[in-house]
Image (spheres, helix red, strand yellow):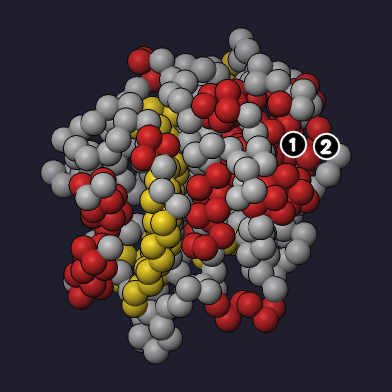
Amino acid sequence: MDNIKLDFQKHIDAGKCIGAEWIINYKNNIHHEVIGYNDLTCKKKLNKDSYYRVWSMTKPIIGFAAMQLIEKNLLSLDDTIEKYLPNFKNLKKLNSLTSKIDDTSLVYNIPTIRQLLQHTAGFTYNSSNNFLAEAYEDNKLFHSSYRSLEEEIDSISDLPILYEPGTNWHYSISIDILARILEVVTKDKISDILKENIFQPLEMDQTNFFISDHKNKNLVETFEYNSVESKLTDINFDKRKLILYGYPSNNRDFSRGGHGLFSTAADYIKFAKMLIDGKDKNSKALINKETLQLMRSNTLSKNLLPIEITSINTNKDENYENDLDGYGWGLGLRVLINNTPQNKYGVIGEFGWSGYAATYFLVDPTNNLSAVLMMQILDADKNIKKDFYNNIFKNL
């Protein structure tokens, strides 16, 4: 733990980080630390009651809720999405990954629930470097802080997909579509589904799609790291950046599947810890072992590997590293399947995910280990997460 704190101080001194909070649960021994500040003026210290926009760390929670409903036979992994969302029944695809938005043909197969969880369904993100992503942005998909999840998904159904389902791995808005399907299946709001099936059993009282007014003061500010100038700056709201997505803290009706949740480090570690055995602190199972093992096992064939996430702004210079090299993908989670030169220390089978603003979590069932790292930095220096990760696994 001392090494981790020293590394964070090093990153703060170098101007790469302003503050961070982390929790490591190793064999039920909990280490909780915080360092630095909430703001660039260094007037407000970061504390252990801080709230964070966890961005894509919303996705594993949605995925877990989907697997719970599959266990209840409310839907199946091999169901096609038009069974629940009829607007997708005449879905088209681009004729190649580089095709323009009007160069399309009908898909041979409609995407399945499994492919939504795998990110092989054919959808994309506004920030990706393709013409479909450009169309997402032109339609301002997910920019609104007020449009319902249903309205956003209906807008997606008017557009083609990027490729024939199952033929590529491409990180996308597929979990937003999945969240809407869960609403259709249960006839309930996704926020209530998560509350009833996950948050209440795990006593995750600080995790939701909104923050109560009196707790809003604990919401950590988001900054951006400028790698050219090697310093943190205020956010640059450029077109095609995901920071343009709606993410209100005070709209009780807002919900999404791929982002949108607020949480604390102390809350999110409860979810991460549960993924070791699928049980709450009272040993009551939220999911069965076989389903949990399926979630955290690689489901991708070799022709879909290696996986990689890039954007229209990705610069593949001599310093570029694919930080997903060595990983496969389960059902909603990255899964380590090979050690690589840049990941020498991770334990095979380690899994987890991360968020757009440098939040991160990992789970190592072999060593009864879970860890959560919370920051709010866009385009964060990858060495911050890498040092955190390596310090954990080098010192087990």
Identify residue for label 2: 186
Identify residue for label 1: 182
Figure check: 321 above or below 302: below
Q: Amino acid at mark 2?
A: Thr
Please tell me whether mark 1 sits on a helix, a strand or a loop: helix
Does residue 264 appear in the picture of this structure?
yes
Name the foreground residue: 256 vs 90. Answer: 256
Figure check: 173 above or below 24: above
Q: Position of residue 91 (x, y in %)?
A: 67, 22
Q: Quadrant of residue 16 in the image? A: bottom left
Figure check: 340 above or below 290: below
Q: Amino acid at mark 1?
A: Leu
Q: CA distance from mark 1 to mark 2?
A: 6 Å
Name the foreground residue: 99 vs 276. Answer: 276
Name the foreground residue: 360 vs 150. Answer: 360
Q: Quadrant of the N terminus?
A: bottom left
Q: Is residue 152 left or right of residue 95?
A: right
- The residue drawn where x is 38% and y is 35% is 366
- The residue drawn where x is 65% and y is 34% is 287
Q: Residue furthest bottom?
A: 43
Q: Residues within 10 Å of mark 2 (few under 14, many from 20)?
A: few
Figure check: 367 above or below 201: above
Please tell me whether mark 2 sits on a helix, a strand or a loop: helix
Name the foreground residue: 112 vs 61. Answer: 61
Q: Is residue 262 left or right of residue 46?
A: right
* Contact check, label 1 and label 2, Cβ < 8 Å: yes
